[in-house]
Image: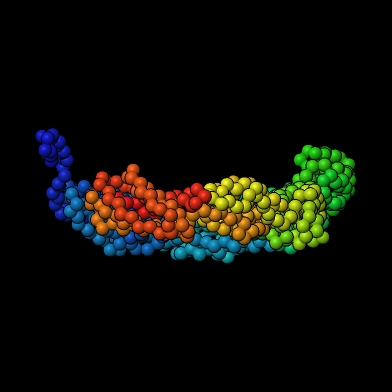
Amino acid sequence: KLVVTNALGCVDTSVINDVVCGGMQPTVNFDATPVDACIDSDVSFTDMSSPYVDDWFWMYGDSTFGFSQNPEHEYVDTGSFDVTLTAFHHGCSYTFTKEDFIHTLAPKAKFTLERLCNNPYDIALESTSVGADEISWDFGDSGTSMDTSSMILTNYTYQDTGAYVITLVAHNFTTGCVDSAMVDYYITDPKAEFSFEVTEGCIPLTITPTNNSVFAQEYEWYSSNGSFSQTDIAQPAITFSEPGSYVEDIHLIITDINGCKDTLDYSGEIKANGVTTDFSATPPVGCQPTAVQFQDNSSSLFGNIVSWNWDIGNGLLTSTDQNPSYNFDTTGVFPVMLTVVDDWGCENTLNVPEAVSVTKPFAKFKGDTLGCTVMEMSFLNQSHGTGLTYEWDFGDGTIATDKNPTHEYLTEGIYTVCLTITDANGCTDVFCRNDYVTVANPIAGFASDTTSASCPPLIVNFENISQNATTYKWDFGDGSGSTSIENPIHVYTIPGVFDVTVIASSNAACQDTFTIENYISLDGPEGQFDFEMDSPCIPAEVMFYAESNDFYTYIWDFGDGMLDTTGFKMADTVAHQYVENFDVIPTLILVDNQGCSRSINSLDSIS
């Protein structure tokens, strides 16, 4: 008993009864009756071992065994045999052997049988009995008076097929024992026989022989040309997948229960008829719209085509004519399916997924429309189609074949551009853009309402007289920058003589520049000044120095509300004290004797 308790206090118990047994080695002995016996007689064995023995194991000496306490055993051959008994008590054992204990007495009846397949009713027998003083045969053919024999070697001829029991009885005069041997035997006369009810038809043609063979246990079918071989089937299916006339030598070999064979050879013509579906389309490729003529080219090996069923373009046209036609008015790749039947009833279908191709290319393009004679103009192809080739006519006598060409016109003018495309089927389309390209070189030019003044400011209205241009860039010569206004107004504030330039463009590649040197002349005082400051701390003393190109009145504006005016001179030096915190820009005003004044601002501020 095992008791198990876990950490939670749960308990389980397992009990196995008689798990350990203690045994004693037994005393072993036995006897048998009779110890001298004829073959196939029952020999009774008696256990004489200790009474507490619980298992027995007998070895009879003829490679057989037993496990009961007092067994019976039949010996099937002559000889002397050792007998061994092993007795057990709770696993403890002891073995005891009696040598040459049992003697089986002659005779032992045995014989061999030979059948001659070429004489299926004849058998040859030979007695191989042991210890036989006399033998007798019984051939089991009760219907004849010649059914017995006492010869060791004997032949017998049966009158009919059937199942027979052949018996050999052997006698030994000394022992008085008799033994017999029996064999169940079948007399057969195998005959291979078959025929074909169907020998022609449509592929796949399957023919099945009618098998009338007798006494066949195994079958082997084959053809002389190796096209067919099959075993273990009485009526095989023979299939001809390809059309043709087959002169077949078909053979059947049967084997009966005794291993004897018979063969039947069949020779005859088998016609496997087939229909070959074929057609042509003229033309197979074309341009929308296109008329296509279909020509049936089908054939039958042994018959004649008698019906046609066309499906053109997945239902665009169904026809039972032999050679129909159809006008394709849409583009695409069209399948064609033809089913034909011959006068044998054989049928075949051909489906060509891409039998007819109808195309219509679509030409289109866009490109640069305004250019000049030094510009390469680009054209973008927007055409649709398969396997396209291109021919561009730029209207100036030149041709290009690129998909997306560039072209440089050498002469100004207005040009019509045409694109001709051709697809893989030879179909074409032409697309023209009339008066599409204008080639004109820009010519820059300008005029103005005034070009000079004696005193700033000078306000000038410029008139743009450029040609073949869409954009403009002006430079007024006074460092004031540029403008893109077509007809600008510009104010000159600094005396001087100025060049004026306009750049006229039709695009980035086409432009012209027009400049008039010394076009603007503006008179008036010219001068400059500077200053020095020792310390920025107030009160701050600043010295101003000025000079001019002529005699002017100097008016100083110090930026802190204080002014200083000096007489008519070409240079001036003044001092000024700043007494408050300021960030000021001083200004010098020059005034000539005509009253024309000009203000000059300092480039730096005073802090």
Instruction: Decide if residue 268 is in sight here.
Output: no
Q: Is residue 556 above or below residue 126?
A: above
Residue at 30% x, 51% y is 576
In the image, taking residue 584 as reference, residue 278 lies left or right, namely right
How far across and down, in percent of the image, does residue 396 sit?
80, 58
Is residue 86 or residue 272 the one in the foreground? 272
Hey, which quadrant is residue 533 in on the image?
Answer: bottom left
Q: Quadrant of the N terminus?
A: top left
In the image: residue 443, left or right of residue 593: right
Residue 207 x %, y % = 75, 49
* Res. 375 image quadrant: bottom right
Count numbered badges in the picture: 0
From the viewer's side, name the closer residue of 263 and 596. Answer: 596
The answer to whether residue 497 is seen in the rendering is yes
Seen from the viewer's position, the closer of residues 1 and 4 is 4
The reply, left or right, for residue 364 in relation to residue 543 is right
Residue 352, image x and y in percent? 76, 49
Please report the residue visible at 77 percent of the width from the left and 60 percent of the height from the top.
Answer: 411
